[in-house]
Amino acid sequence: MTAVKIAPSILSADFSALWQDVLKVEEAGAEYLHIDVMDGHFVPNITIGPLIVKALRPKSKMFFDIHLMIENPDLYIEEFIKSGADLVTVHAEPVHHLHRTVSLIKEKGARAGVALNPATSPAVLEYILPLVDLVLLMTVNPGFGGQAFIPEVLPKITAVRKMLERCGSSAEIQVDGGINRETAAAVVKAGANVLVAGSAIFGSEDIAAAVRQIREAAEGGEG
Ligand SMILES: O=C(CO)[C@H](O)[C@H](O)COP(=O)(O)O
């Protein structure tokens, strides 16, 4: 099993002091900075654009993990990568030509991820897996932080882990939504290795302790 990585989602950060919050999770040892981009179409919320990514880039050495919850990702992929994205994840649901979109991310020099909503079958991944660096399995319906974890996604995590093993892929499995000290062990036991957490980290009085506690709980789920 690959080591667990913690990816704080800045959706729950203090936007009036954003880079200071980023610094706190970096100092706490979190590996990925999860940046949620929402367009008000694919999901009913509007958040961050490439300008914010560009502004944060010189402030942090963290791995910038961009989660595009948008209808037409092809229009924005290059701009996000130029702004400092290390990984760009697109949702399978709104994309018409997933192979083209994943190829575009890689051509432009970033790692490529594919995200699936809780109700989406992992079958859509079958012919794209060899190209993909990360599979993001949503454990809430995307759009908002602070929602309750959907346990029905657990068998899907295990199914995707088996798919990756079958095709000899070293892609990571990320989970996002309702991840906290209580749910971390179960998702790792099921096969996830990158844990996104927003409210459980930035909603905590002690951000460093929250990162540590989620990591400790997650490591308790390692087989
Ligand atoms: O993608 C997201 C919402 O669409 C967020 O990253 C996710 O919900 C994290 O928030 P929390 O940890 O509070 O559930």
Image (cartoon, rainbow, N blue to C red):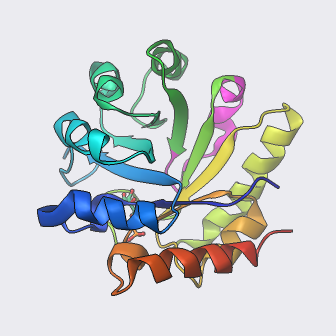
The verdict on residue 119 being magenta is yes
Q: Nearer the viewer, residue 157 or 14?
A: 14
Can see residue 148?
no
Quarter-wise, where is residue 8 in the image? bottom left
Q: Nearer the viewer, residue 107 or 41?
A: 107
- Left or right position of 175 against 154: left
Can see residue 60?
yes
- Quadrant where the N terminus sits is bottom right
Position of residue 189 measured from the top left corner of the image (x, y, whole percent):
77, 69
Position above or below: 98 against 67: above
User: Where are the magenta residues, as a range?
Assistant: 116-130
Position above or below: 172 against 187: above
- Left or right position of 140 against 56: right
User: Which residue is most to the left?
Assistant: 16
Q: Nearer the viewer, residue 101 or 105?
A: 105
Rendered residue at 52%/78% (across/down) = 180
Position of residue 164 measured from the top left corner of the image (x, y, whole percent):
79, 39
Rendered residue at 33%/87% (across/down) = 205
The verdict on residue 9 being magenta is no
Rendered residue at 61%/40% (across/down) = 134
Position of residue 11 measured from the top left corner of the image (x, y, whole percent):
29, 61
Position above or below: 210 against 8: below
Position of residue 19 measured from the top left corner of the image (x, y, whole percent):
24, 57
Quarter-wise, where is residue 214 in the image? bottom right
Q: Nearer the viewer, residue 152 or 192?
A: 192
